[in-house]
Amino acid sequence: MRREFAAAVLKRLLDQGLLHLDHSILVVAGGEVDKQLFHSLGFTSVMISNLDDRLVGNEFSPYSWNLQNAQSLTFDDEMFDFSFVSDGLHHCSSPHKALLEMYRVTKRGVIVIESRDSLLMSIAEKLKLTQSYELTAVINNNFKYGGVDNTEIPNFIYRWTENEFKKTIQSFNPIGRHTFHFFYDLNLPFRMASQRKGRTFYYLLKVAQPFAKLFTYLFKKQGNSFSMVTLKPAIPEDLWPWLDSQEGCIVFKTNGSGAVSK
């Protein structure tokens, strides 16, 4: 998890008044680092969820824990204010399904931190400077967990773009105007480099770090740390002009005779 980047994103949302410390938060594919993150910022109502059936439930105190598959959450619609995931969607066999489940169970919106599908990352993949399949996650979990759907099979690292995120959300809920926020940063893979045989790659990263930081400062979207945030449409203010809210239902707007209202 990119804790420093995640903390910076949450602080930005807090400063902008979009997020509040007493909002109820569902963390999917979460763990101890997520607990530390939210606790350090002062959030009071957080539920950590994941697929780790080795847990008993008190590991994330003072927050609660729930055994959940992000792709088929058992919670009711709009049960939480926000849902949050950091580097968890690419561990799902269907990242888009998990994203939409996160959207379904929230009243206000979704906060995602993942990798961006940029030109720089494509080049890094071809040069074998970053992983396409996350072997290290399985290696770091005794070759038993940490892969796709928390199995021992290393997951493909699905990387996102702004348009893909927008289209996924707007296809799922086409009733009105969503608000989107995107944040960018650079996170060089020092941990992966330290696990390789020899130290050459690690030292090359050290040398390249200031140049990479300057490049991604000038071209922010080339950074590999990427946060995608969506806020749900307010009803009725954000409804599309061809829709109307009547007795709690969203309906196609007509003038009463069956003709479309302009």
Image (cartoon, rainbow, N blue to C red):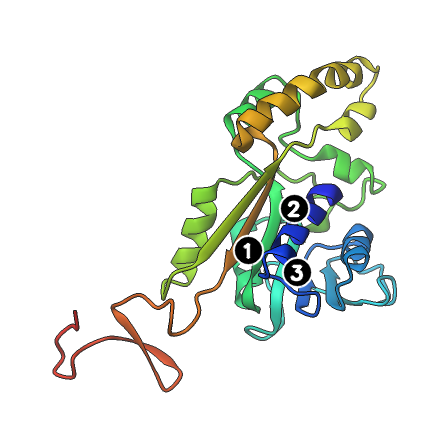
| Residue 62 found in image quarter | bottom right
Q: Which mark is residue 99?
A: 1
| Residue 114 found in image quarter | top right
- The numbered mark, 2 or 1, whose residue comes first in the sequence reads 2
Q: Amino acid at mark 2?
A: His
Near mark 3 (Cα within 10 A), the count class, few <14, some 14-19 or many ≥20, is some
Marks 2/1: CA–CA distance: 12 Å
Residue position marked by numbered label 3 in the rendering: 69
| Residue 124 found in image quarter | top right
188 left or right, relative to 39: left
Identified at 58% across, 75% down, the residue is 76
Farthest-out residue, bottom: 247
Whole-percent x, y for residue 5 in the image:
69, 42
Q: Which mark is residue 215?
A: none
Q: Which mark is in front, 2 or 1? A: 1
Does residue 198 lie above or below 114 as drawn? Answer: above
Marks 3/2: CA–CA distance: 11 Å
Dot 2: element: helix
Does residue 19 lie above or below 5 as drawn? Answer: below
Dot 1: element: helix
Whole-percent x, y for residue 201 in the image:
76, 16
Q: Amino acid at mark 1?
A: Leu
Identified at 40% across, 57% down, the residue is 170
Q: Nearer the viewer, residue 36 or 130?
A: 36
Quadrant housing the C terminus? bottom left
Whole-percent x, y for residue 245 in the image:
34, 79
Identified at 73% across, 55% down, the residue is 30
Q: Nearer the viewer, residue 188 or 75?
A: 188
Residue position marked by numbered label 2 in the rendering: 91
